[in-house]
Each structure stands twice: as C-alpha cells, then as structure tokens.
C-alpha cells in the first residue's frame, strides 16, 4: 500500500519508534492520528510535526491503551477525523519485569484490542475498505531471554496472534493484511530501563549486537506497509543483517509425527 493520502492510527507515538514511524509516514504523504499516555510529550510532538508537515495532517489524542474505553475513543477519534483508517500500527509497549500485569496489558492486550478494532473497521466483507495492521513485537518475541521473561512472553503473544489472524480462511474477504515487526535493540528511552533481571546479560547482548537507529527500523515499517504480498510477514530487523522476512509455516514433515512450526528466511 502506498502511504500517500492514506489515514493512519498509531499507538505510542510521542517518542521513540512510534514517533519515527509517524514522521516517515508524514514524509510519504499520509495523515496520522497518534495516541500516547504521555500527554505532555504527545502535545509537544504534535506541535513540532504540525509545524513541519502541516496542521491538518497530524493529530495527537491522549490515551492509555491499557484502558479499554480510552483506546476505543482514540481509535474512534481517528475514524471521525479521517472517515476511514487504512493503516493501524499497534506500537505502544513497555519493558518492566516488576509489573507483569501491566506489561501484558499494554504489550499484548492492547495489541489484540487495537487489531480487533482495526479489523472490524477495515474488513471489506462488512463494508470497510481493507487495510494493513502492523503489530510491533521484538526480536525477543522470536527468542528466549532470561533478562525479561514477561516482556518476551508479551512479544511471543503478539507474533502468535498476528500470524494466526493472517492465516484466517476469511483473510481474502476481509482484505486486511497482518504483519509483525521484530526489531533488535534500538536507541530509544526503553534502553534506559533498569527493571529487568540480570542487566549484565542485556548489556553484553547490546555490546555484541549493537543498537539500531529509530530511522533504520521506521524504514523497515514502510517496507511492511508498501509490500502488497506480505500477509503474515514477520519482519526481523537487526543491525548486522538489516530487514529480513521470516516466513512462518505449519509443516507436516512426514504425515506421521506432529505438525511443527517452521520459520524460513
Ligand atoms: N527500544 C528497543 O530496543 C525495542 C523496542 N521494541 C518495541 O518498540 C515499541 C516502541 O518502543 P520504544 O519506542 O523503544 O519505546 P519508548 O519508551 O521510547 O516509546 C514508547 C511510547 O509508548 C508510550 N506508551 C507506553 N505505554 C503506553 C500506554 N499504556 N498507552 C499509550 N502509550 C503508551 C510511551 O509513553 C512512549 O511514548 C514497543 O512495543 C517496544 O516493545 C521492539 C524491539 C526493540
Ligand atoms: C534481546 C534484547 C533486544 C531487544 C529487546 C527489546 O525489544 C528491547 C530492549 C530494550 C531495552 C533493553 C535495555 C537494557 C538495559 C540494560 O542492560 C542497560 O544497562 C544497558 C546499558 C547500556 C545501553 C547502551 C546504549 O545505550 O547503547
């Protein structure tokens, strides 16, 4: 899908990757409504982006996406501003191993709610125009990580949910494309988080694997949006290997043993 002239709803856009994605989309001619729980930063970001791109193409709406009503109201605001939402990016996320309920509510719960809101609005078999749902997971959703088991679980949930909807028998009728983004570490405020186990493990990991710029990852999101044939895609983005699709298949290897999930590049 070409972002030019399209309408976007994005969560967690006040800073970090969310803001980076908003900026790329605006530069490609999209209109964006983003929400965030950080009201001060959200307003400041809105003001800066309106100055750069125009007051009628980017809007901030305060919302905590772990709250059902606030999340629905923010999505509804995007629909009423733009009449339709073509692209939904469920990006808001936190890393906090001291509060597993909150991590699951934001990283998994709000991604599920946001996806279902977008599906209901977009699905062509119920009068919508189709669209794309991008769910932000992490490389942690593909691996194991003893430093942050809850975060890892929440990101595995995002990938399982998104790829399962992508394989829905109704997907062609819905005309909604489902994609997961799995970045490695990025230079955002999340890197300052201390509420993890064994911080030295992550420090070592970051030393070995490096830290990407937000811009590099936001470019990969544009690839996800623009490629029309990637329903079910899991796009892994790392500093060493760049953006690569992992394709997930359920495989019957020999007709005798259990089915297995296989990822191929
Ligand atoms: N920074 C990294 O190394 C990586 C981050 N990610 C994922 O990227 C996404 C964005 O994270 P970053 O930009 O790095 O973090 P960030 O902390 O810089 O930005 C996250 C934004 O989400 C907002 N937010 C948090 N909870 C919210 C809530 N309940 N409702 C609404 N907004 C909320 C924050 O206020 C903030 O503006 C997250 O899903 C994160 O898990 C994935 C891989 C690596
Ligand atoms: C497996 C990890 C890769 C990506 C997971 C992910 O989605 C997000 C991870 C985000 C933050 C990790 C923070 C870790 C922090 C601590 O270990 C710090 O002590 C790190 C220390 C310095 C950071 C150096 C830098 O900014 O380059």
Image: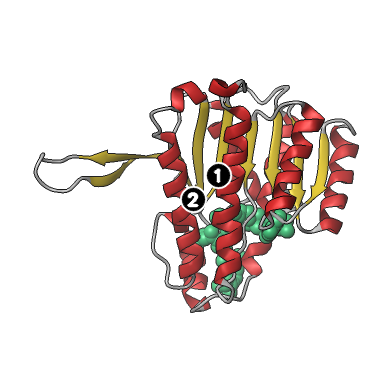
Quadrant, the C terminus:
top left
Q: Is residue 12 visible?
A: no
Which residue is disc 1 drawn over?
135
At x 62% / y 62%, what residue is drawn?
94
Residue 161: x percent and y percent? 45, 46
Q: Tell me the colour scheme of the image.
A: secondary structure
Q: Earlier in the sequence, mark 2 or mark 1?
A: 1
**Image quadrant assignment for residue 30:** top right
Circles 2 and 1: CB distance less than 8 Å?
Answer: yes
Q: Is residue 90 depicted above or below 188 in this figure?
A: above
Q: Splitting the image into four quadrants, where does ligand 2 fall?
A: bottom right
**Image quadrant assignment for residue 166:** top left
Quadrant, the N terminus:
top right
Q: Is residue 49 visible?
A: yes
Foreground pick, 30 / 104: 104
**Image quadrant assignment for residue 47:** top right
Would residue 157 be found to the left or right of residue 47 on screen? left
Residue 155: x percent and y percent? 49, 56
Circle 2 sits in a helix, a strand or a loop, which is it?
helix
At x 68% / y 62%, what residue is drawn?
189
Foreground pick, 96 / 165: 165
Which residue is disc 2 drawn over?
158
Residue 179: x percent and y percent? 50, 38
Numbered badge on residue 202:
none
């Amino acid at each position: 899908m070409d972002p030019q002239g399209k309408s976007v709803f994005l969560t967690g856009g006040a800073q970090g990757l969310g803001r980076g994605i908003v900026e790329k989309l605006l530069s490609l001619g999209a209109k964006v409504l983003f929400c965030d729980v950080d009201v001060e930063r959200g307003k400041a970001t809105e003001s800066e982006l309106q100055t750069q791109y125009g007051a009628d193409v980017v809007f901030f709406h305060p919302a905590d996406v772990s709250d059902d009503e606030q999340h629905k109201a923010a999505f509804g605001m995007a629909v009423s501003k733009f009449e339709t939402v073509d692209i939904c990016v469920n990006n808001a996320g936190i890393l906090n191993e001291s509060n597993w309920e909150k991590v699951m509510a934001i990283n998994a719960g709000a991604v599920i709610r946001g996806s279902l809101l977008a599906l209901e609005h977009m699905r062509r078999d119920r009068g919508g125009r189709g669209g794309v749902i991008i769910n932000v997971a992490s490389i942690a959703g593909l691996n194991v990580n003893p430093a942050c088991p809850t975060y890892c679980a929440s990101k595995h949930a995002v990938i399982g949910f998104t790829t399962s909807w992508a394989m829905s028998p109704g997907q062609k009728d819905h005309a909604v494309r489902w994609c997961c983004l799995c970045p490695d570490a990025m230079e955002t405020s999340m890197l300052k988080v201390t509420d993890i186990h064994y911080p030295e493990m992550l420090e070592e990991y970051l030393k070995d694997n490096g830290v990407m710029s937000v811009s590099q990852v936001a470019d990969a999101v544009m690839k996800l949006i623009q490629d029309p044939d990637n329903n079910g895609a899991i796009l892994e983005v790392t500093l060493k290997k760049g953006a690569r699709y992992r394709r997930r298949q359920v495989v019957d290897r020999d007709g005798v043993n259990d089915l297995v999930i296989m990822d191929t590049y």
